[in-house]
Image: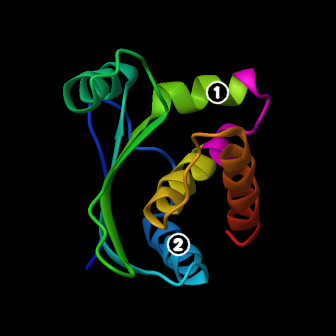
């Protein structure tokens, strides 16, 4: 079981892989989960649009797409993150680009832990969970 970080058609972001993986494991544990195989792919807007169109039939850009393969209390999945959108969001929301990246990284894990963000109430819960996770990074 491993947490892997890769990039495609974009420079790999400035993250410390081992430290980030340990943080992810800690957050998952806080939700009563253990980590299985989790694969991150950092990509550009064109790649995430392609994935969104092909697999989800959505015709728009997004910062993250999470495919959940979890079983029981073991979380596993493929997480695609568009660095283009993460960095443009950091400008739009006036946040530090690195913090925005970590927010999105953990957002995918929170989805794997069972959190949703479809309704306004769920979005508020997700935002609060992201903030709590960022505090322990």
Residue 100 can be seen in this image: yes
Q: Residue at x 64, y 45 (%)?
A: 98
Q: Residue at x 64, y 40 (%)?
A: 119
Find residue 76 and report its horizontal and vertical position in percent. 31, 67
Instruction: Using the image, tell me which numbered label, if any, was put on residue 70.
Output: none
The mark total stands at: 2
Q: Which residue is mark 1?
A: 89
> Mark 2 — residue?
19
The picture places residue 79, in percent across and down from the top left corner, at 36, 50
Question: Was residue 136 drawn as part of the magenta stretch in this picture?
Answer: no
Q: Quadrant of residue 137?
A: bottom right
Q: Can the viewer see residue 39 in this picture?
A: no
Residue extending farthest to the left is 54
Q: CA distance from mark 1 to mark 2?
A: 24 Å
Give the colour scheme shown: rainbow
Q: Going 47% across and 33% down the picture, which residue do you hit?
A: 83
**Label 1 residue SS:** helix
Proximity of marks 1 and 2: CB atoms separated by less than 8 Å = no
| Position in image of residue 88 (x %, y %) | 61, 22
Q: Secondary structure at mark 2?
A: helix
Instruction: Say left or right for 45 vs 77.
Output: right
Q: Nearer the viewer, mark 1 or mark 2?
A: 1
Of the residues under marks 1 and 2, which one precedes in the sequence? Answer: 2
At x 77%, y 67%, the residue is 135
Q: Residues within 10 Å of mark 1 (few under 14, many from 20)?
A: some
Magenta stretch bounds: 92-100
In the depicted structure, whether residue 115 falls above or below residue 99: below
Q: Nearer the viewer, residue 89 or 73?
A: 73
Magenta residue check for 93: yes
Query: In the displayed structure, would residue 63 be above or below residue 1?
Result: above
């Amino acid at each position: 079981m491993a947490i892997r970080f890769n990039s495609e058609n974009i420079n790999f972001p400035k993250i410390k892989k081992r430290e980030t993986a340990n943080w992810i494991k800690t957050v998952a544990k806080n939700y009563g989960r253990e980590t299985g195989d989790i694969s991150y792919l950092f990509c550009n807007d064109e790649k995430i649009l392609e994935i969104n169109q092909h697999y989800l039939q959505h015709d728009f850009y997004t910062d993250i797409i999470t495919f959940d393969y979890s079983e029981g209390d073991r979380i596993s999945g493929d997480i695609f993150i568009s660095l283009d959108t993460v960095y443009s969001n950091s400008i739009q929301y006036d946040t530090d680009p690195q913090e925005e990246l970590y927010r999105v990284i953990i957002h995918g894990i929170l989805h794997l832990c069972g959190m949703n963000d479809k309704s306004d109430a769920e979005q508020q819960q997700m935002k609060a969970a992201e903030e709590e996770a960022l505090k322990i990074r």
